[in-house]
Image (cartoon, coloured by chain):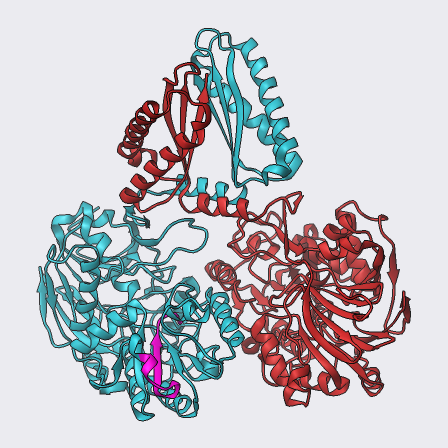
Chain colours: A cyan, B red
Amino acid sequence: MNEVANRLSIIALGGVHEIGKNMYVIQYDDDIIVVDCGSKFPDESLLGIDLIVPDITYLLENQNRVRGLVVTHGHEDHIGGIPYIIKQLNMPIYATRLTLGLIKIKLKEHGLLGTTTLHQIDSDTRLRLGSVSISFFSTNHSIPDCLGIAFHTPQGTVVHTGDFKFDLTPVNNQFADIHKMAEIGMNGVLALLSESTNAERPGFTPSERLVGGHIHEAFTNADGKIFITTFASNVHRLQQIIDAATAVNRKIVLLGRSMVNVADVASSLGYLNIPSNMLLDVAEAGNYRRDELVILCTGSQGEPMAALGRIAGGNHRQIEVNPGDTVIFASSPIPGNERNVARIVDNLFAKKAKVIYGPGSATGMHVSGHASQEELKLMLTLMKPQYFIPIHGEYRMLHQHRLLAEAVGVKASNIFIVNNGDVVDIVGSEAIQERKVPNGNTFVDGLGIGDVGNVVLRDRKVLSADGILIIVLTLGKSDNKIVSGPDIISRGFVFVKESEGLLEEVHRITLKEVEQLQQEYAKMNNSWSIYKQTIKDSVGKFLYAKTKRRPMILPIIIQV
Amino acid sequence: MNEVANRLSIIALGGVHEIGKNMYVIQYDDDIIVVDCGSKFPDESLLGIDLIVPDITYLLENQNRVRGLVVTHGHEDHIGGIPYIIKQLNMPIYATRLTLGLIKIKLKEHGLLGTTTLHQIDSDTRLRLGSVSISFFSTNHSIPDCLGIAFHTPQGTVVHTGDFKFDLTPVNNQFADIHKMAEIGMNGVLALLSESTNAERPGFTPSERLVGGHIHEAFTNADGKIFITTFASNVHRLQQIIDAATAVNRKIVLLGRSMVNVADVASSLGYLNIPSNMLLDVAEAGNYRRDELVILCTGSQGEPMAALGRIAGGNHRQIEVNPGDTVIFASSPIPGNERNVARIVDNLFAKKAKVIYGPGSATGMHVSGHASQEELKLMLTLMKPQYFIPIHGEYRMLHQHRLLAEAVGVKASNIFIVNNGDVVDIVGSEAIQERKVPNGNTFVDGLGIGDVGNVVLRDRKVLSADGILIIVLTLGKSDNKIVSGPDIISRGFVFVKESEGLLEEVHRITLKEVEQLQQEYAKMNNSWSIYKQTIKDSVGKFLYAKTKRRPMILPIIIQV
C-alpha cells in the first residue's frame, strides 16, 4: 500500500449492497473520519442473532488515525451500532442536537454515558479534524435535524448526502439548505456519495405535509377511539398527529417505549410541540369518552410485541380496541413485514375496528423519507461531481442510481459501485478502485458481540431443520467393552411415540458398528474419532433413508 | 349432535383465516362430499416443516359416509394435499381433464397411481353422489379448466365458486359460464361459498390479454436472449409467451421441472398450442444466436434453487445471462417473497442484464387470477344467496368480502365468517353456527406425515435460537460417586475459543451441584430427575446472566 501516493481514500464499511449498518470512511493522509455507525436487523437465516453491526477491523488497525465519528441523523441504520462499536473503539462523536439526544438514550441503556466525548453541531458548524475541514448542509428526511456533509480536503471536496429527500413544503418549515448545496457544487465537488434507497422509484417523493391532511380528515370522521401508529422517530409525523388531535379536541396517549422516549427527547429539545394539557397517561384514559382519545403507539411494522400488536391481540393490560374504534397505520409495511402487519389487521377486524392500512401510496397515510429518481437527479445536478459513488442501497438500487447519474451527465467511467470493504483511492485527480480492507458483519447475540460465527450458525441451521440425536456410549478403559449404552436421546426430531421403532433400529446399528470396530481396534487409543465418525455415518444414512431428514447426530463416547 | 335435525351442513376443514390448504365439506344427511384438498407452505416459524395439509380427523371418523372428492382446479392450494390425504383416506376423485392431468403427476411422484379412482368431468357433467345432485359452471382463473360447483340437495342449492375472476376477453376464448351462473341464481341459492383472495382490492381485475400485449412489446424491443419467468400453471400466460416468441421469430427453451411438466401435460391435452418447430432442448440453444432465443423458466417468486435463481447466480450448467440480455418477471412477488426476488434482480443487474421486475400493476407483466371487489359483487348479485360464507382468505379478506355482500343486499345476520372446523348447519331454512369438528394443520416433514408436532417444533425453536449444551456425567452405581465427567459439549451456542471460560464455569457449577446432591441423596434411586433439573436450572441461570442466551441444556447421567 503506497501511503504517499494514495492521499485521499473513500471506503464503505457498511451500507452498500444492503439496507442498514451504514458506515463510511473518508481518509486523507493520516486522518480517518468515520461517517455513521448503523445497525441492521438479521434476516431469518441468521438464527438467534439479535443485531448486525459493521466489522471495524480496519479502524482498530488504524486506531491512532481515527479523528472522530460524524453522524448524519438519528435513525437506527446510522446510530444503532454506536454502543457496540464504542466499546471496541472510543472516538469522539459529532452530531446535531436531536441526533445526540437519541445517541445518549442508547449509551445510557448500555451504561456507556460518559465514556466518550459528544460534540453538538448544526448545519452552520465548521469543523477541522486533522487536515480535513468539514462543513454541513441541512436536508429533509423522515426525522428532523439531518445533515449532509462536505469534507474539504487539500485534494478536493467529498460530499456525503446522508439520507434525504427534497420536501419543498416541510413540516415546521425546516427547509433544506438548497442554496448551500448549490454553492458547494459551484465550488467543485471531487466525489459525491449519495443515498440510493428509492433509486428504483420514478418521480418525486410527496411532501410530508400531504400525510397531515389525510390524518386530519380521518380524525374528523372517526367516532370511537383513534389508534394511530407510525415510526417513533418520524417526529414531523408525530407533530402532525398531535396537531390533528388538537384540532378535533382529543387528548393524546403515548404507548410503547420508543414512542415515549422519542417524544420525550424531541419535545424537551424543542423539535416537538405538545400543548401541555394534551398528553394523558394511559391510566387516565378511562376517565375520558372514547371520542376524546387518540392513542399514538408503536407497532407500525406489525411487531407482535409492540404496543399495537399487544392491543390488537387483546394482550395490553391498560387499553383495548372496541367495536367502531378507528386504527390508522401511518406507515407502509417494509418488504418482509407484510405478514406481521396482516396478522394485526386480522385481529383488529375481528374486534370490529375500522382499519386504515396498506401501502402509503393507496392510503395517503405515509410518504417516504427518501429521494425518488427526480430528486436524486436534482442532487447530482446541484453537486456536479467529478466522481460518483452511489451508497445506501442494495445492488439494484445502486445500479439504478448509476443510470440516473449517467443520464444527468456523469461520465460512466467515473461512477464506482463499490462493495463493503472496497477502497476508492483518488491519486492526483484520478480515482481507482483496487484495494480492499477487512469488512463484514459482526453479529450481536444477547450480550455477545462477534462470538457467533458461521460454524455456530450452520449448527443452528441443522438443529432448527431436523433437531438432534445424541448417542451416548460408555466403554471400559481396559478392554473397550461396552459398560453402558448406547443410550439414544433426541430433541426436535420426531415425536417420541412415533420414533420408537426408529430409535430401536439406531440402537441396533450402533451396537453392530461398535462390535465391528472393537474387532478392528483392540484399544481405543486414537480411534475415538473413527468410532464417532462411523456411528455418525451409519446412523445418518439410515435415518435419511427412513425419514428424509438429517438431524445432527452427536455420538458421545465415555471411557470408565 | 342431532343428526336428524341437521340434514345439511357446510364445513371448512382448511382455507379460511389462511391462504392455502383449501378443503371444504358439503354434507347432506349421510352423504359427505369433499371439495378440494390443498396444501400450503409453512412460514419460517415452522422450522424444518416442508408442507402443511389439512387435518382430516373428521373425514376419517366418518369414512363410510365420504362419497368423493370434487376438485375445482389444479393449483397447489387445491390439489397439493391429495397424495398425503389419499394415503389415509381413499376416495374417488372428480376433476376436469387438465386438473386430473396435474393430479396424476402428483400421484405418480408418490407411487400412488392406480390406488384411487379418477373420474373426468367437465362443466356439462351432472353427477349424483348419494342424495346430492351436482352441476358445474366454468370460471376464469389463472389456470384453465376451472369449475364452480352447485350442490343440489333436497334442502336447497349450495354453490362453491372455486377460484375465479371475470375475464370478458379470455385467452383462447375460454369464456366463463355467466349465463349458467345467472340461471343457478334465478333458481334460488340457499348458500354461497365464494373466494375472497382479492376482496381488499377495489375495481375489476384486468384481463389476462393485457399481459400478452406487454410481453409482445418487450419481446419486440429486446436485443439479446430473453429470459421470462411466470407460474408454470398459468397456461394462458405460457400460451401468450409462446405466441409472442412465434411473432418475433424466436425459439423457446423450457427450463425447470414444473415448467416442463405443465407444458407437457397442457400441450398433450390440447390446452397449450406449441408449434412443432418452436421448442428447443437447452442443449441445442448454443446453435442459435442470442436474439433467436426465449428461455421460459421457473423461479418467478425468487426461489433460489429454481431455474432463474440458478441462472442469475451463475450456477446453471447449461445456460447463462450475458450483458444486454433481457429478463422479464411475468409475475408479482407474493408478500414474503420480495427479498428473494430482489436478490435475483441484484444478481441479474450485476451481470448487466436488463430486468423488468416489480408489481404487475407497474410493469403490466402480470394480472391477478382472482376477482376484485366489483367482480365479487357481480358473483353475489348473480347468485342472490340466502346465506353467504366467504371462503379462501385471511380474516381481513373474509371481513371485506362480508362488507361487499352487505353492500349488494345480503342480510348481515345471514353472513357467516367461519373458522376452520366450524360447522354451518342449515336446519329447516335457518342456518346456525354452533358446532365444531376436529381440524388443524398436519405437518409434512420429509417422509413423515403428522409425526412432528408442537413439542418437536418448540425444541427446534430453542435449538435454532441458541443451540444446545450437553452435560454428560457418569456416576458409580453403588456409591453415586463421579466416575467420569462432567463433560460439556455445545453445538450452535458460541465459538469454542470464545466460550472456554464459560464452559469451565459450567463445569464448576455442575460439580458443586452434584456434591450438594450427593449429600442429600445417598443413592440415585428416584433422584435422577432432581439431579437433572438442578443442573439444568443452575447452569441455565448462569448462562443467561452471562450471555443473555437460553441454549437448550441437556444433562445426561449415566450409571456404571
- What residue range appears in magenta? A285-301
Residue B189 falls inside the magenta stretch: no
**Any part of residue B446 in sight:** yes
B147 with respect to A277 (left or right): right
A516 with respect to A432 (left or right): right
B530 with respect to A71 (left or right): right
Q: Is residue A247 above or below residue A157?
A: below
Where does residue B520 sit, x and y in percent of width and height? 34, 26
Where does residue A240 sit, x and y in percent of width and height? 31, 85
Frontmost residue, A185 versus B509: B509
Residue A293 falls inside the magenta stretch: yes
Where does residue B128 sit, x and y in percent of width and height? 91, 68
Frontmost residue, B483 versus A556: B483
Quarter of the image containing the N terminus of chain B?
bottom right
Frontmost residue, A185 versus B442: B442
Q: Is residue B163 above or below residue A551?
A: below
Where does residue A292 sit, x and y in percent of width and height? 35, 87
B417 with respect to A12 (left or right): right
**Any part of residue A142 in sight:** no
| Count of picture labels | 0
Q: At 35% from the left edge and 53% from the top edge, which residue is drawn?
A: A50
Q: At 63% from the left edge and 83% from the top edge, which residue is drawn?
A: B373
Image quadrant of residue A115? bottom left
Frontmost residue, A333 versus A493: A493
